[in-house]
Image: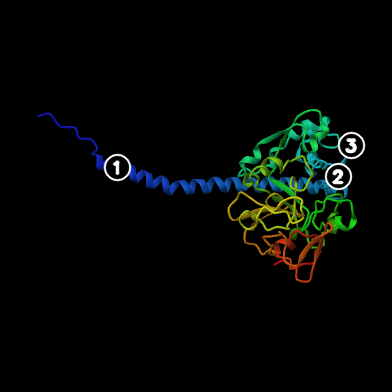
Amino acid sequence: MRRTRRGFSLIELLVVISIIGVLIALLLPAVQQAREAARRVQCTNNLKQVALATLSYAETHGTLPLGSLGQQGYSSGSFFLGILPFLEQKVVYDIMNFDVNYGETQNVTVSNCRPSVLVCPSDPAAFGFVVIDGAFSFELSTLPARVRYTSYAGSTGTFYQYSRLPERLYQQNGLILHRLTVGLAEITDGTSNTFLLGERAHTKLAEPWRTEWHWWSSGYHGDTLFDTLYPLNPFQKLPNIAADFDVPAHVSAASSMHPGGAQFAMADGSVRSVADGIDSWKNDPQTGLPTGITFSAGVFQVGPRARFGVYQALSTRAGNEIVP
């Protein structure tokens, strides 16, 4: 007698498919977590490399690099341009003409030469670029400029001031500043307790801010400088409001694509993860200003009701705060 060949029944096939689906559902988060862990490690390495390059610059020149310098009414080039030789990018550094604004014709090619170490692998939009033709600071250029983004920025402290007035400039209590430079000896709060660099989640920005901000070659606040006026990762905490009528919270604050917080390079070259729920002063959702702080005639007034959080304390170089 001929034997009858028996295959899978429909029910058996559905059971097998269900089991496979369950296994995939169980394994997929683990795979995603493993990939994110690898990206986080790469981001840590990027921040450490940039921090060590910045500190090497300070050892060579006596101060940390200048954050920005207003020139011809426009922002100057970023501090990243100054540390290029310490990032093994001397070829790009030699192309840059520091005697003229970064947006002039002779410097246009540099804006397209962003080192890969300046992008967090978890921040996909930061790998892109925007073409600027006769707008913003590139009004000085006769050629269109391809400008690339960055996921990192230097810390100006609790406040940033785009001004020439000393009473405003000296409110910048961080390390990478507008029109001022800081020596390592001035970090009396301790280099291990002071932010040098922080992350920026470029991908989380909505348009048009995603296109118009976080340019790696620009020294302007909101491009390569951050402050702690606003809380860490403010997207769900605060409207995109500008308390100083300049750069809005989502653009200027430190933020990250990594879940649970962000990574910061400290002034001793170490890299630390800071939890999203770190103690921070409370901002008014209507004005963006923290309790006890007002902004008038371009100056931040710190009143008796103001209370620096741990997050703000970590951004000051000589605030004498006790950081747990």
Quickly name the residue at label 1. Answer: 14
Residue plotted at (39% across, 46% down):
23
Secondary structure of the residue carrying tag 3 is loop
Residue flagged by tag 3: what amino acid is it? Asp
Q: Nearer the viewer, residue 290 or 323?
A: 290
Rounded to the nearest whole Å, what is the CA distance between mark 3 and mark 1? 71 Å
Residue 315, percent from left and from top:
75, 58
Task: Specify the quadrant that holds the C terminus.
Answer: bottom right
Q: Is residue 234 left or right of residue 26?
A: right
Residue plotted at (77% across, 64% down):
293
Residue plotted at (83% across, 41% down):
74
Rounded to the nearest whole Å, what is the CA distance between mark 2 and mark 3? 13 Å
Query: Closer to the N terminus: mark 3 or mark 1?
Result: 1
Q: Is residue 50 left or right of residue 11?
A: right
Q: Is residue 321 visible?
A: yes
Rounded to the nearest whole Å, what is the CA distance between mark 1 and mark 2? 68 Å
Which one is closest to the eye, mark 2 or mark 3? 2
Residue flagged by tag 1: what amino acid is it? Leu
Quickly name the residue at label 3. Answer: 99
Q: Is residue 37 left or right of residue 160?
A: left
The numbered dot on residue 70 is 2
Colour scheme: rainbow
Q: Locate residue 318: give its quadrant.
A: bottom right
Which one is closest to the eye, mark 1 or mark 2? 2
Q: Is residue 84 left or right of residue 126?
A: right
User: Are the residues at dot 2 and dot 3 in contact (C-beta closer than 8 Å)?
Assistant: no
Query: Closer to the N terminus: mark 1 or mark 2?
Result: 1
Secondary structure of the residue carrying tag 1 is helix
268 over 133 or under it: above or below? below
Q: Nearer the viewer, residue 316 or 42?
A: 316
Residue 62, percent from left and from top:
88, 50
